[in-house]
Amino acid sequence: MPITANDPKRKSWLEVPQDSDFPIQNIPFGVFLTKDDVITIGTRIGNYAIDLGALQQLNYFDGIELTDDMFMQDTLNDFISDGKKTWRLVRNRIADIFDENNPKLRDHEKHRETIIFKIEEVEMQLPVLIGDYTDFYSSREHATNVGKMFRDPENALLPNWLHIPVGYHGRSSTIVPSGIPVHRPMGQTLPNGETTPVFGPSRLVDFELETAFITTDANIMGENIPVYEAEDYIFGMVLLNDWSARDIQKWEYVPLGPFLAKSFASSISPWIVTMDALEPFRTKGPVQDPMPLPYLQEKGKKSFDIKLEVSIKPENAEATVVSKSNFKYMYWSMSQQLAHHASNGCRINSGDMMGSGTISGPTQDSFGSMLELTWGGKNPLKMSDGTERKFINDGDTVTIKGYCESENVRIGFGEVSSKLLPPYSRK
């Protein structure tokens, strides 16, 4: 089935600013609260939020097999469970409805008032009920930098790293959408030179520049997923700031890896950009040497050219861009990550989220964390107000943006932006 929604010549009768992340060729999916306090599934074109529940009730999806309440729910899980064919049919239909040459909704003022909202009139919600969250560690540059800092620089990568997409099971209960502030976590740390740990606020809170993909129901328990089929089970992608407390992590991660240093908060962008929308921006990833084992071998363009940017905004000051990176630097692809995840028969469900791991590029200004950008705090970054940062201060707002761009079209994710607050205190 062709992806007609991607036609670069298509224009919408809704106004779309020239540099918008959300032209009619994007059509992401999300969940929002309307000005009438109704939660609905929606999409976005330009600076307009579109109520898909209202569109469905008014029969604009006639001819597509959907349950009666498909878009009148507070999560996308059921829609994602319907699979790739339905996602494509719906996305193509939305593109047709909002095409400048289609008068059906364009010329129906009453319907437009029910269906279309200005983006500032809605409140974005978490788009899916995330049952399970896995975070990978798939940037060679990031893993090498961390290895150099904390281990033998000559053997920065651990022996397994070039053979498997390393990952760990994260915590879904503290994943929040953009705009929700995050509290500095409390935890155990071991001060330098001491032998006894202390409990208190983390002093080394960091961002991690990541993306994440959202899955559909992919297998039954015991069944694996062939790498060449894996992408069929990926609904789309979001931006992810996987907050980290480096001092807590350093004390706790041996022998079982990340725990409380990571589970206090993960922030995601609220619009899920579909794999269909990203199709024109495919590119080859890094050469993999040694060759992965057969179940992870794949051919063709399995990565995506997604430009990424991180800024830090102190309170009462302008934001400072601290990193510019790209998703194409990732050593392990999403297909390889998913195939490996299910290779032992682990069940993958609708709404599961898989983090890429910190995305670092080959140059210092493309590193994806303060740990790397300041090299463990040794080289502080200067902010717009003249202050310096080794890690994230209370009151700082961290914003991650991402987009793909060609001569014809720009497809973006919007942003994930979160403010760091002092430790939570009970009243």
Image (cartoon, helix red, strand yellow):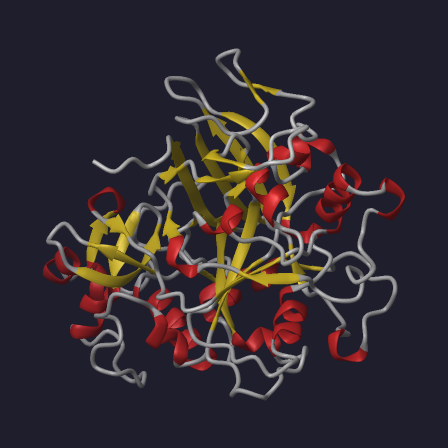
Q: Residue at x 36, y 64 (%)?
A: 128
Q: Can you give x and y, in whole percent of width and height, for residue 358 in the image?
A: 62, 48
Q: How many marks?
A: 0
Tell me what residue is drawn at x 60 percent, y 56 percent: 356
Task: Give x and y (percent) for residue 100.
Answer: 33, 58
Q: Position of residue 90 (x, y in %)?
A: 36, 73
- Which residue does the image show at 59% across and 44% down from the upper left? 249
Residue 119 location in percent, x, y?
27, 46
Could you tell whether 190 is left or right of 266 in the image? right
Name the residue nearer the viewer: 33 or 394.
394
**View extreme (front): residue:** 196
Quadrant housing the C terminus: top left
Taking depth in this image into account, of 72 and 332 the one nearest to the observer is: 332
Q: Is residue 303 above or below residue 264?
A: below
Q: Nearer the viewer, residue 136 or 117?
A: 136
For the question of whether residue 411 can be seen, the reply is no
Q: Quadrant of residue 147?
A: top right
Horizontal side of 244 relative to 397 (left or right) equals right
Position of 30 relative to 225 (above/below): above
**In percent of the image, x 39 and y 34: which residue is there?**
419
Question: Is residue 308 among what the camera can see?
Answer: yes
